[in-house]
Image (cartoon, grey):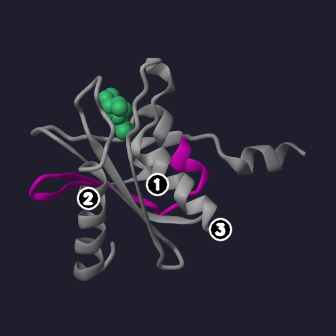
Amino acid sequence: MPDVKQGAKLFELAKDAMNKAYVPYSHFPVGAAILTASGKRYSGCNVENAAYPEGTCAEAGAIAAMVLDGETQIQDIYVIGKGDGLVTPCGGCRQKIREFSSVDTKVHICGAEGVRKSLTLNELLPFSFGPENLEQAS
Ligand code: THU
């Protein structure tokens, strides 16, 4: 768990990203912010498309920014959306996060007021398939 100051910074980054989302079709903005094991931060928002399946999720945007900067270890990821429910990463995003996760990678689900629930990636995606599976096969 990031310390209070780091957590607040990540929450703000995710919220700022959510406010930049391009969502003319769903009107459902989502923001994500990553803290890497090395202490760096990246954020992303969902970007929709008139060809609906081509839209990308907030988590995917944050992961792309992280990889572009040469980082590959997600320590924590904050996800924020609108409404009273838990805006948990979709199935595809759970797998995308999995690629860059460790056993203690945490996903913090946020609402307007702050973090609503913190889960390990393993809780969201148990018995997951990852890079190790490919390594074991060769
Ligand atoms: N969305 C995300 O950005 N992340 C998720 O994990 C859940 C869904 C976006 C995709 C789409 O632009 C909108 O939320 C409604 O599904």
Q: Is 99 a magenta residue?
A: yes
Using the image, determine if residue 15 lies above or below residue 96: below
Q: How many marks?
A: 3
Q: Which residue is mark 2?
A: 16
Q: Which residue is mark 3?
A: 70
Q: Which residue is mark 1?
A: 62
Using the image, determine if residue 27 lies above or below residue 72: above
Q: Amino acid at mark 1?
A: Ala
Give the SS element for disc 2: helix
Q: Amino acid at mark 2?
A: Asp
Tell me which label, 2 or 1, sits earlier in the chain: 2
Q: Amino acid at mark 3?
A: Gly
Query: Neighbour class for label 1 at 10 Å: few (<14), some, many (≥20)?
Result: many
Query: Neighbour class for label 2 at 10 Å: few (<14), some, many (≥20)?
Result: some
Q: CA distance from mark 2 to mark 3?
A: 23 Å
The stretch in magenta equals 96-118
Tell me which label, 3 or 1, sits earlier in the chain: 1
Give the SS element for disc 3: loop
Q: Is residue 102 visible?
A: no
Could you tell me if the residues under marks 2 and 3 are in contact, i.e. CB atoms within 8 Å? no
Query: Neighbour class for label 3 at 10 Å: few (<14), some, many (≥20)?
Result: few
- Name the residue: 31% across, 41% down: 88
Q: Nearer the viewer, residue 51 or 121?
A: 51
Q: Quadrant of the N terminus?
A: bottom left
